[in-house]
Image (cartoon, rainbow, N blue to C red):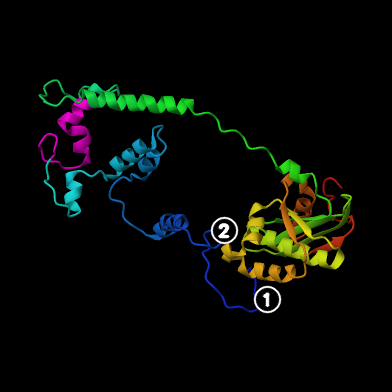
Amino acid sequence: MSLAISPTHRKDAFCWSYTKNGQYTVKSGYWVATHILHAEEETEVTQPSITELQAFAWKVNAPRKIRHLIWKLISGQVAVTRNLIRRNLRCDNYCPRCGETEKNVTNAIFECPPALQAWELSSTPSNPQTFPISSMEIDRDPLELVRYAESKRQAWYNAKESIPNPPQAPNTEVVQALSLNNMCMVDGSWTFTDFFSRIGWVWKDNTGKIQLMGTRNLRRRETTLHSELEALKWALESMLQHSNCQHFGTDCKDLIAIIKEPQAWSNFSTELEAIQIILMCYSDFKITYVPRTHNEIADSLAKNARSFHRSLCFIGCSTPVWLPIPPHI
């Protein structure tokens, strides 16, 4: 079993396993409904699917309202009178533009005489046999509407070309990573196929010299974030025994968010409960984000434990001969 047991034997609680923090979101619920529940249903397909066309509508190089209109046309969701009557709305079931009976969206957009004339007058390439208007006698001239639509299109292209590139924010990671003295840096390594999760940490003193390091194999946890929490938990326990270090570093921003807002990450409540108990022994605990390039030693210690297909736990002042030497040592 990869599930952790509460050290205080608190009652079990529900959490949503399809988000990182265990909180339900509409987006994740929609994904479950369309990718898992829908896949389990065995339904007979009686006509070609329009799913790919609907997805393609949102990729068209056009304003968002035009993409929305295309999606509604493909889905048959335009508010023509036939659809309104089907939804029990009171209205006359005829086309208000030409007076003919309106059957579906296709009739309104492509077959209604005013729509045919608008397509013919527009600059959109079309087949004259598809939009024959030579014999039509229509009182209303749609040319003004066509010109308005083309002016809107040109204005959108001009606005799109004139948008300046947003200024890049200054890189603050380098400034932050310059002071890593008297800090214990932690990291976890996790893959779905391995039997173990690997964790590692390294402590540097005030002069930046390595004083202690550790690497360990644990039974594989549910996610990589669980491994990151285990790495921090073990580093906290080790620093209490071997040093007075209060400052910890990680290249995982989610780990920092979990520690700062534990109530928002119900998926890790058991691990956070154990860490909160340990933090009671710290007077000035602080955790900082460091770039991956400045956390290579802890990362290497965690990944090197992958070669051991059995339980492993090592703490020492230098790298043993049976463990590959991490970089920058």
| Residue 309 position in % (x across, y down) | 75, 61
Circle 1/circle 2 CB separation < 8 Å? no
The residue labelled by disc 2 is: 20
* Amino acid type, mark 2: Lys
Query: Label 1 to label 2, Cα distance in Å?
Result: 22 Å
Q: Residue at x 11, y 46 (%)?
A: 92
**Element type where label 1 sits in the image:** loop
Q: In this rendering, is residue 328 above or below 123?
A: below
Bounds of the magenta segment: 95-120
Q: Is residue 2 left or right of residue 43?
A: right
Residue 205 placement: quadrant: bottom right
Residue 88 left/right relative to 221: left
Measured as percent of width and height from the top left, residue 279 is found at 73, 67
Q: Is the residue 148 above or below the residue 310 in the image?
A: above
Does the image show residue 57?
Answer: yes
Is 321 on the left-hand or right-hand side of 60?
Answer: right
Magenta includes 258? no
Left/right placement of residue 36 relative to residue 209 reads left
Q: Residue at x 20, y 24 (%)?
A: 129
Can you say which quadrant of the picture contains the N terminus? bottom right
Q: Is residue 111 magenta?
A: yes
* Disc marking residue 7: 1
- In this view, the residue in front, 80 or 156, is 156
Secondary structure type for disc 2: loop
Q: Residue at x 65, y 74 (%)?
A: 5
